[in-house]
Image (spheres, helix red, strand yellow):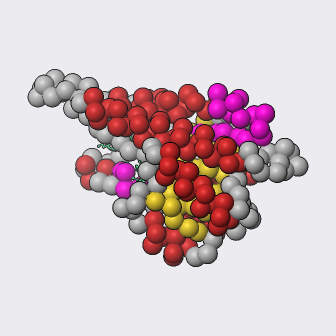
């Protein structure tokens, strides 16, 4: 149960973030769905009812995130769990040796800006708001959950930007947990494998109905709610701190096709 837990979920209008927002509400909590103003976040929040509200947020903007936290305070009075799911990917080799096309620096920086900068922006501002909470019986004031990827560890060809960004999310987990320990705020990261969302749409067709890497068990794409189950576990287990959990059915990504 997540009774009365107030969560803020970035990327909450789609995929893993949406499943997390839905689970929070289903389990008795409340949620601020943060996503781009162009997303379906407003309709989704309406559909979820009074325990959900939408905040138009670009995670790289300090003002947008502050406005979302203000809305959280006004509507629900506090923040217990911030879940960073907003993220983007690009698949492009550093250099395409056949066509001689070079990865643009702009694309590289954009992925880092959203995936690292956005995650850190939401984490630091959420922590500031959580620090105002009364501690629970364990002294805990809140929990922050970030989303990396198994690409942080074994990125494929074409994933310099994405893998670097996710490795940074893994890398900030322990220092952030240490920074926030004295305030009673926990920080964990989930590193998902292949999950069925709009980010991986078309992946199976692209690979002739096959998954790009040999799955172990279960030999299928993850369901978004299986990610949300990991979020619930981290929120409810007070010993989960400073840790990165792979949720990937034991898959290991292979180098992939020559791009
Ligand atoms: N689907 C998968 O197989 C995996 C996904 N991930 C990571 O999980 C997270 C969620 O991905 P999915 O749900 O699959 O993707 P998705 O594309 O379904 O959802 C991502 C959401 O983030 C939002 N978003 C993008 N840029 C934003 C910004 N600047 N500000 C606010 N919102 C923004 C999008 O509008 C979208 O609603 C991402 O960080 C992704 O890298 C990690 C491993 C596996
Ligand atoms: C690069 C991949 C795999 C090959 C392909 O045909 C298309 C792709 C685009 C989406 C990528 C694919 C894969 O590398 C796994 C990720 C990076 C996927 C987006 C999210 C992804 O599932 C992930 O982060 C896995 O950990």
Q: How many marks?
A: 0
Q: Position of residue 74 (x, y in %)?
A: 65, 64
**Measuring 55% from the left and 56% from the top, which residue is drawn there?**
68
Magenta span includes 182: yes
Q: Quadrant of residue 140?
A: top right
Along the line of sight, which residue is nearer the eye, 181 or 72?
A: 72
Along the line of sight, which residue is nearer the eye, 158 or 21?
A: 21
**Measuring 50% from the left and 57% from the top, which residue is drawn there?**
34
Residues drawn in magenta:
175-200
Q: Is residue 134 left or right of residue 123?
A: right
**Measuring 71% from the left and 35% from the top, which residue is drawn there?**
180
Q: Is residue 101 left or right of residue 203?
A: left
Q: Give the quadrant of the C terminus.
A: top left
Q: Position of residue 92 (x, y in %)?
A: 26, 34
Q: Residue furthest right?
A: 137
Q: Position of residue 246 (x, y in %)?
A: 56, 39
């Amino acid at each position: 149960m997540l009774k009365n837990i107030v969560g803020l979920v970035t990327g909450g209008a789609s995929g893993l973030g949406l499943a997390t927002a839905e689970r929070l509400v289903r389990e008795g909590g409340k949620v601020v769905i943060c996503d781009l103003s162009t997303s379906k976040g407003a309709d989704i929040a309406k559909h979820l009812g009074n325990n959900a509200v939408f905040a138009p947020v670009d995670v790289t903007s300090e003002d947008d995130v502050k406005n979302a936290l203000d809305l959280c305070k006004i509507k629900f009075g506090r923040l217990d769990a911030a879940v960073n799911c907003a993220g983007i990917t690009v698949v492009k080799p550093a250099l395409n040796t056949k066509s001689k096309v070079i990865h643009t620096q702009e694309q590289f920086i954009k992925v880092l800006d959203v995936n690292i900068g956005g995650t850190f922006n939401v984490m630091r501002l959420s922590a500031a708001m959580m620090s105002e909470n009364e501690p629970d019986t364990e002294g805990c004031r809140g929990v922050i959950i970030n989303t990396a990827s198994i690409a942080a560890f074994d990125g494929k060809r074409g994933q310099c930007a994405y893998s670097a960004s996710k490795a940074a999310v893994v890398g900030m987990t322990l220092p952030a947990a240490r920074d926030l320990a004295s305030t009673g705020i926990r920080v964990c990261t989930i590193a998902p494998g292949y999950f069925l969302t709009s980010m991986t749409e078309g992946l199976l067709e692209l690979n002739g109905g096959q998954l790009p890497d040999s799955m172990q068990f279960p030999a299928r794409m993850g369901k978004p709610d299986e990610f949300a189950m990991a979020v619930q576990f981290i929120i409810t287990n007070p010993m989960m701190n400073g840790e990165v959990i792979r949720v990937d059915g034991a898959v290991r990504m292979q180098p992939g096709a020559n791009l």
